[in-house]
Image (tube, grey):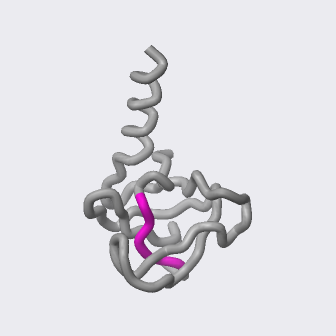
Amino acid sequence: AASDVYKRQVHARTRAQAGQIVTITGAASDAVDALALLDGPGRGGVVGRVGNGRLMTVDNCEGNWCHVRTTTGQGTAGWIETRHLRAR
């Protein structure tokens, strides 16, 4: 059924693991700074911003949040909701 396909797609998109490279997705606009990265899972201040299509590396996850960083390890890093991550 269509709902089962959707559930599998959502699960594949949100099942991030440490060291995995993911693509940022689901931002309301295609601006390069469309989504905020926070300094804590679900709380805290904005420490950076990313947009759709940006490749990031997952450091670790807590619940529905993952700490991500740029694939080079330099620059942007912070917490983002798993709904904005898609496995590559």
So how many labels did they put on this image? 0
Q: Which residue is drawn at 64% across and 64% down?
A: 51
Return the x and y of residue 27 as percentages of the image width and height: 62, 57
What secondary structure is the stretch in magenta mostly built from? strand
Q: Which residue is drawn at 49% across and 48% down?
A: 86
Q: In which quarter of the image is the N terminus?
A: top left
Return the x and y of residue 8 as percentages of the image width and height: 39, 30
Q: Residue at x 65, y 67 (%)?
A: 34
- Which span is picked out in magenta? 76-81
Relative to the observer, which residue lies in front, 44 or 69?
44
Answer left or right for 54 relative to 68. right
Q: Residue at x 39, y 62 (%)?
A: 58
Quadrant of residue 57 within the rendered picture: bottom left
Q: Which residue lies furthest to the left in this view?
A: 62
Q: Is residue 74 magenta?
A: no
Q: Is residue 31 above or below residue 23?
A: below
Return the x and y of residue 39 as percentages of the image width and height: 40, 82
